[in-house]
Structure formats: structure tokens, C-alpha cells
Amino acid sequence: MAKPAPNTGLKRLRNRYRMVVMNEDTYEEVVKFKLSRWSVYALLSAVFLIMVGITAALITFSPLKYYLPGAGYGDAKQVNELKQLKIRADSIEKALHQNQQYMNNIQQILQGKMVPKDTTVLKVKKNKKNKF
């Protein structure tokens, strides 16, 4: 079995192909291109990089950046204000929950549904060894 030539992959990349776009009705050549695999790969890579660049620019230079979670965009004043508002909202939520519990307890007491706690004194046997 013959060994393949060492640079067959590169030769395949450099082989030239002709692509012709024809009109089906008249069989007239509309457009023709001379391409190689290398040029197709280069073109697709360039298109991909341009699309990534456009997407990054859109996100960076437009208000879309504010919709990304954890991006931390905005000046320090806005970030600090957001933290304070989160803390304030949490404390208001806690106070509301405590107020609701208080109102529920008052309603249960007024309706007589509250079971009073057992406050009777338990009689404990005194141990003779202890001097208390």
C-alpha cells in the first residue's frame, strides 16, 4: 500500500473549484466564482468574527448591557443605591411579616381560639442533700 503524500491536506485546501450559478430556464450563467476550500474557510471565519464583533459592540455601546445579569454596569452611585434599595425592601418585607403575625395573634385572642399557656407552678420534690 502506497503512503499518501505528506501535504495532501494542504493540497486539498489549495485546489481550485469553480462554482457557477445558472438560470434554470435559459441555462444562462448568472454568476461564477473560482474558490478553494481555504478561501471558503477564510470567508466563513471572517463572517463569524465580524458577527461576534457587531454583537459585542451592540451590547457594549447600547442600553442592552443593562439587561445582562451580573454585568455590574452603571456608575458606582447607581450600584450603591441599588444595594440600599434591596436592603430596605428586605427590611420592609420582614416588618410586614411580623405585623401580619401580630394581627393574626390579636384576632385569635379576640375570637377565643388562642389556647392559653400553662402557667401553673409545678411542685418539685426537694432533695435533702441540697441546701436550697
Image (cartoon, grey):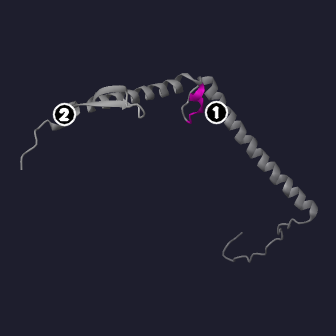
Q: Residue 123: percent from the left, percent from the top?
A: 78, 75
Question: In this picture, is 79 found above or below 5?
Answer: above
Question: In this picture, is 121 found above or below 109?
Answer: below
Is residue 115 rendered magenta in the image? Answer: no
Q: Is residue 13 left or right of residue 122?
A: left
Q: Residue 68: percent from the left, percent from the top?
A: 56, 34
Image: magenta residue range? 63-69
Foreground: 14 or 119? 14
Identify residue for label 1. 83
Can residue 58 be seen in this snapshot? yes
Q: Amino acid at mark 1?
A: Lys
Identify residue for label 2. 10
Foreground: 70 or 95? 70
Image quarter (top left, top right, bottom left or bottom right) of the C terminus: bottom right
Q: Residue at x 10, y 42 (%)?
A: 4
Dot 1 or dot 2: first in sequence order is 2
Q: Residue at x 49, y 23 (%)?
A: 57
Can residue 44 be seen in this snapshot? no
Q: Amino acid at mark 2?
A: Leu
Is residue 67 rendered magenta in the image? Answer: yes
Q: Quadrant of residue 119?
A: bottom right
Secondary structure at badge 2 equals helix
Number of residues whose C-alpha sits closer than 10 Å to that of mark 2, classed few (under 14), some (14–19) or many (20 or more):
few
Q: Residue 129: percent from the left, percent from the top?
A: 66, 75
